[in-house]
Image (cartoon, coloured by chain):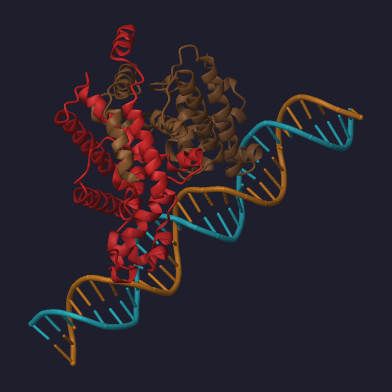
Chain colours: A brown, B red, C orange, D cyan
Amino acid sequence: MERPADDLTARARIRDAAIRLFGERGIEGASIRDIAAEAGVSSGLVRHHFGSKESLREACDRYAKERMLQIGAELTQDHDLTGLDPLALHPVAFPLQLYIVRSMMDGSETATALFLEGVDAVEEWTTSYGINPKDRRGYAAALAAIKLSVFVFRDQVSKALGEDITTLAGYNRIGQALMEVFTIPLLTQEQLDNMRKQEK
Amino acid sequence: MERPADDLTARARIRDAAIRLFGERGIEGASIRDIAAEAGVSSGLVRHHFGSKESLREACDRYAKERMLQIGAELTQDHDLTGLDPLALHPVAFPLQLYIVRSMMDGSETATALFLEGVDAVEEWTTSYGINPKDRRGYAAALAAIKLSVFVFRDQVSKALGEDITTLAGYNRIGQALMEVFTIPLLTQEQLDNMRKQEK
DNA sequence: GGCTTGACTACACGATCGTGTAGTAGTTTG
DNA sequence: CAAACTACTACACGATCGTGTAGTCAAGCC
């Protein structure tokens, strides 16, 4: 259950506000004062608890990563990794995911580490599922990037579909479409081998 | 052939510098003064030519879109749309692509329009290639997002592979891996139908 | 010749940024 | 009870932001 904002400590409210605003506007786009106002505290308190903007960002990185793994662990029951991550629509995970992607694009090491762990997970999954690509690591990296792509371009995809994909209906639709991408082979193995030869 | 920076008009140099810095640091992260310095002119000249930062951004949007379509048209000869866009490695297109993705994430309408045109192109391509997904539009939107995903997460993918994918060798590797994603069916049509039923 | 026009620079403006300092209220500790 | 500590606010700082103003300089036109 989600607790109302009043039940959280000021420190937690600042951190949550920072993750939300950083995720929505980017790191440069969200000021300490914006974050303080969003959390309902003075800007000085942000500094008191986190020291500097960069430290606040690192704290957000750590928390987002930890919380994300935690939520992910809670719903691994029917996690088959082929399609969209069900995490993406989770009401708590959504702003976290948004923040992490922004943080990745700004070159955060913690966020990048989370991506690498995702690649590891996909790699293990291919083995246990008996999928044997020529380049297992490359395959896993491509799949990991693909899993994030629909989330990153959710506004653009929503516009293309005329349907908000952050709602359950829209999410199911793009999820199904993504499944089809993984179902319909666009190339035969033979074609792929021919392309490989050409590049040699 | 690429002309040296001195041959370009100051206006063009400012625009190119803006696209480069906006793309690398984000819109908020690049100041007028940074852009002016990068272009080797005074900050006042940026204002003289473009009026305001927002206008400069719109000019960059228009130019990047136009130039991108132009470059794309030049190398459509072996354009099969299944894999990575060969545009991504083009020395001129690379900073443009970077800028457009940033601009998309900041909600630019011009950049989003470019995405929608990409979806249209993929949609037409599926028809002419005899690919008939249940949800053609959704399928095309997913493919369009996927095509951008490896580019967006190029730093993370490079790190996962231990190889820079913006070099020719690394690009070929991730390109091949992406091909494999489109070649190996992760689900059978039957499995997909079953999943569809479950969500009803 | 004078006069306009456009490219360009120098500089100052108010706002906002991250940060620093000082201080208050409440609780804990000895 | 006093001292110490913690959570918190108010306010001022220098820097940097986008923008505004005034002016220089060269080219083109009458």
> In terms of depth relative to the viewer, which is nearer, B95 or C13?
B95
> In terms of depth relative to the viewer, which is nearer, A142 or A65?
A142
Q: Is residue B83 above or below residue B87?
A: above
Quadrant in which the C terminus of chain B appears: top left
Q: Quadrant of residue B137?
A: top left
> In terms of depth relative to the viewer, which is nearer, A187 or A74?
A187
Give left or right: position of A167 versus B158: left
* Residue at the (52%, 36%) spot, across then down: A111
Image location of residue A52, percent across then percent down: 61, 44
Q: Is residue C1 above or below residue A45?
A: below
* Residue at the (22%, 51%) spot, across then down: B66
> In terms of depth relative to the viewer, which is nearer, A33 or A17?
A17
Q: Is residue B78 visible?
A: yes
Q: Quadrant of residue B175?
A: top left
Quadrant in which the N terminus of chain B appears: bottom left
Give left or right: position of B119 versus B25: left
Give left or right: position of D8 versus A197: right
Image location of residue B174, percent across then percent down: 39, 39
Image location of residue D10, percent across then percent down: 61, 42
Q: Quadrant of residue B52?
A: bottom left
Q: Is residue D6 above or below residue B186?
A: below
Q: Is residue A162 visible?
A: no
User: Number of callouts in the render?
Assistant: 0
Image location of residue D12, percent across then percent down: 61, 54
* Residue at the (36%, 59%) spot, across then down: B17
